Image (cartoon, rainbow, N blue to C red):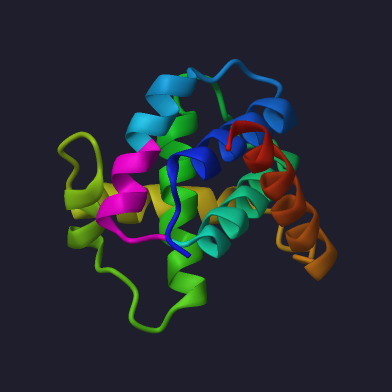
Amino acid sequence: MVVDKNTLIAIHCILSDLLRIPINRKLFIRRIGQVVTAATCHENELILAIILLLRALQNNANITEKNIYYQYFVAITLANSYLYDAQLSLSQWAQNCWVAVEPSKIFGAQLVFLNNVDWDLCVLEADYVEIAHCIDLIYEVYA
């Protein structure tokens, strides 16, 4: 299922709560919505991106209200790479970003992000299911 606005609202709520930082809802929906639409992302990519973001945070990654949009964008690109063989190229991702970005900058950001992820922590199916369930519950509130 392709992601809609209510799913983005649910993800915004989850990230705001988990990261304990104020994230501008309209800006989040507009920026991440552009990426999701252009890259035809599905909910499973966004859930894995949340898990990757949390793993990076647990390893003291610097995630702030100013860089959350870019950090989540990088997490989405990595989730897409893990889930699909026919992933988007870095130049395609660069075109999907809300600002002009060089593909090499995205690659560099991916390397920094991957370095911040604590790989000793497994991605458990229960984590994925819990986040998917939260999205469904919040989605129902905004539907």
Q: Give residue 130's quadrant in the image.
A: bottom right
Q: Residue furthest front?
A: 143
Residue shown at 15% from the left, 38% from the top: 100
In the picture, the quarter occupied by the C terminus is top right
Position in image of residue 104 (x %, y %): 23, 54
Side (left or right) of 122 relative to 110 = right
5 vs 11, nearest the viewer? 5
Q: Is residue 56 above or below residue 91?
A: above
Residue 16 visible? The answer is yes
Q: Main secondary structure of the magenta part?
A: helix
Magenta-colored stretch includes residue 36: yes
Residue shown at 23% from the left, 49% from the top: 96
The range drawn in magenta is 32-41
Residue shown at 60% from the left, 32% from the top: 142
Side (left or right) of 71 relative to 98 = right
Q: Give residue 111's quadrant in the image.
A: bottom left
Q: Is residue 58 above or below residue 45?
A: above
Residue 111 visible? The answer is no
Side (left or right) of 43 relative to 124 = left
Residue shown at 20% from the left, 34% from the top: 99
Q: Is residue 95 above or below residue 72?
A: below
Side (left or right) of 87 relative to 11 = left
Magenta-colored stretch includes residue 74: no
49 vs 102, nearest the viewer? 49
Q: Is residue 62 above or below residue 21?
A: below
43 vs 71, nearest the viewer? 43
Q: Give residue 44's quadrant in the image.
A: bottom right
Position in image of residue 121 (x %, y %): 79, 60
Position in image of residue 55 (x %, y %): 70, 50
91 vs 47, nearest the viewer? 47
Q: Residue furthest right?
A: 126
